[in-house]
Image (cartoon, coloured by chain):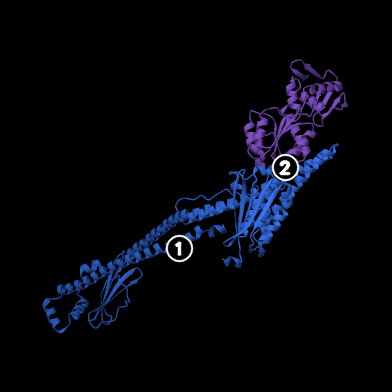
Chain colours: A blue, B purple
Amino acid sequence: MRYFFKSIRWQLQAWYGLLLFAVPVLFSGIYYQIVRAEKIGEIDRRLEDQRIFILDEFRKAVFEQVDPLSLAEKINSETPFEVLIETVQSASFEVPSRIASEFGGDDPGYYFFHLEDRNGNLIARSDNADEGFEFPEFPVEGFNIDSRYVGNVREVLVTHAFGMRLAVGQEISSEIREMRQFRGRAFLIGLGVWFFGLFGGWLIVGRFVKPIGAISDAAARISEGNLADRIQVRKTGNELDELASVLNTTFDKLQAMVESQRRFTADASHELRTPLSVILSESHRMKKGERTEEERQESLDLTLLAGGRMKKLVEDLLLLARQDSTELHLELEELQVHELVGEIVASHQSLAEQKEIKLISDLQPVRISSDAMKLTIALSNLIGNAVSHHVGKGSVWISLIREGANAVISIKDDGPGISEQDLPHIFDRFYRVEKARSAVGGHSGLGLALVESVVRQLGGTIDVVSESGKGSTFSIRIPLGNDEAKVV
Amino acid sequence: MRVLVIEDDPLLRRSLVATLRDESFAVDFAADGEEGLYKAREDIYDAIVLDVLMPILDGWQVLDRLRPNIKTPILMLTARDAVPDRVKGLNKGADDYLTKPFDPEELIARIQSIIRRRSGLVHPSIVVGDLEVDVGTKQVRLRGETVQLTAREYGLLEYLAMNRGTVISRTRLYERLFDENDDTLSNLLDVHMSNLRKKLGQQVITTRRGHGYVVE
């Protein structure tokens, strides 16, 4: 579970969800504010109409209820407003019926008004009006207007410069309820949009994250040992597919390496098991029953040969293992290659003489900086092969020349040669040309693999030209690796 | 009993042949799969020892080409001891499987066991009247007394006893008792037969004139 919430899918989802939350909140919020402002504007406009209506009605009432002659008289000595106050305050004044019907009561949505003079003396009011209005300051001319909420009531307060203050208000609980409902709906819609977005996002993120899961699953299966397993690559060509392809290639290479290692171990064990079988069988046989001297001799020969083969194999395996280990470093020294080659040729002389093979050397003096031990392994194997694979009565030519910045050593023989189908495999480990196998003498099938590995490590190259029945030529090229290389 | 050894490694081949000959088998050998296949098709062997890793034709290929026509019991010999390899061998019609390096006594026991199984014998001893032939220890007892036989005499008796009730022709006896290197005269069989009858009595092996011999 802990890992679940740490998953990319969850983290993406969380950040995305957070961002997405802001969208409906902002949107609904702004929309709500717009709608609300409009609603209030509408109420205020209505109240403004009512204010004008009140003033008109009173003015009309004054004209209706006061005798026109006395009114004309009054207007000469008083301001129109004073006439209005006086008239309205007089006992005989009747509040116009239209005002009485419009303002009053306490049904939801009722209107009220309150009219007073400069000194706060009441002029007229509807009986449902509150008291203690906070009117704006008196202006120098015209009027000041102010609007506010008191509980469920919206009121407009107007202060006229000529000394009149008027409050008009409306109970707006139904509007407030409407707004509240609208807010609730906006919230629900916003929430819906958010959930929809989250769900869609979850699906989309899931779609994109899915390959990661597939990759990690495949990697897990591979780490459990199923090396042949691979990640399914969809052909969309996005970054994850590229990653999957790269990983698959890596797995391919690893599998090939493991496979070749496994094959090598199996081959090595096979190569060891066969001579071991011989030794075991022969010792058992000789322990049992009476044996003639001849039989005993023959069995000992077999055992010795098998033992010799195992020894050679173990030595070559060790060399190859050492060669394979990466820590291995070269011990470079200045070498007189012609002397080194001469010594190696000399060491094969006796075997060559037994088989009536002439070793013919043509060695130019060449000085290189290289690893003597390695070079000896390579050359010894090549010359040894040329002699031991030879049917006998022939020649092996060994030449050393300098070619540019390389020392080139060629070993040519007029032995049996290598057939066309064997040629590409001769550097494979444990590959043995069939004839070589029947020649019992110390061949591990590792010799040429070892030579190739050593030459490569020395920075050189090896190539072979051979024709079945006509002999082979192995040439190795080793870089001089010293000042000599600069001398043309 | 005549056995064919198909093994490419010259040392092991020599050792195998010597080991089997010590146990009075007539032994032929082949150095690669092709030669082995050619010889095995003659269908004159009681068992074949077949190495898996060989040039030209490997053991699996030889096995594929022999079965199902040639029913000779086959013991596969290999260095690989992984289970899938064993299963593969047995599924393809090999009768047994031995991993190198092996104990030669185990090899002998397994060869004898696959031969016995093929001839329908469950127990290693065959009883014919007063005579008991123990093919496991290669001992022959007549009325409880051990009879000393030469390897050839024993081989002759064992083959007839294992195919009890069947008339075996002289040619077949030759095929099964002498390997390709034996330079035998045809009357050698009569010599062995006569010696055997002297040691066991005349009644054990019956001669069917013109057909061959039978143990009833």
Residue B55 coordinates in the image, percent (x, y) = 64, 40
In the displayed structure, A25 sits above or below A116; it is above
Task: Looking at this view, name the residue that lies furthest to the top.
Answer: B209
Q: State whether residue A139 is above or below residue A278.
A: below
Count all numbered tags in the image, as a single digit: 2
Task: Indicate left or right for B149 with A105 as reference.
Answer: right
Q: Is residue A475 left or right of residue B154?
A: left
Residue hosting label 2: B100
Image quarter hosting the N terminus of chain A: bottom right
Q: Looking at the picture, how far across and down is residue A224, in whole percent?
A: 61, 51
Viewer-nearest residue: B191 or A153 = B191
The chain containing the residue under callout 1 comes to A
Crowding around mark 2 (Cα neighbors within 10 Å: few <14, some 14 to 19, many 20+) is: many
Name the residue type under label 2.
Lys
Looking at the image, residue B115 sits to the left or right of residue A25; the answer is right
Q: Is residue A16 above or below residue A306?
A: below
Task: Look at label 1 and name its amino acid.
Answer: Leu
Q: Determine crowd level at label 1: few under 14, some 14-19, many 20+ residues with C-alpha closer than 10 A.
A: few
Q: Nearer the viewer, mark 2 or mark 1?
A: 2
Residue ID at (45%, 61%): A16
Disc number for residue A18: 1
Q: Position of residue A54 (x, y in %)?
A: 22, 71
Work out which residue is located at the far right of the displayed protein and give it: B145
Task: Give the vertical position of A454 relative to B81 (above or below).
Answer: below
Q: To which quarter of the image does residue A120 belong?
A: bottom left
Asked which secondary structure carries label 1, the reply is helix
Q: CA distance from mark 2 to mark 1?
A: 69 Å
Given the image, what chain letter belongs to the residue carrying mark 2?
A: B
Image quarter where the C terminus of chain A lies is bottom right
Which residue is nearer to you in this view: A112 or A310?
A: A310
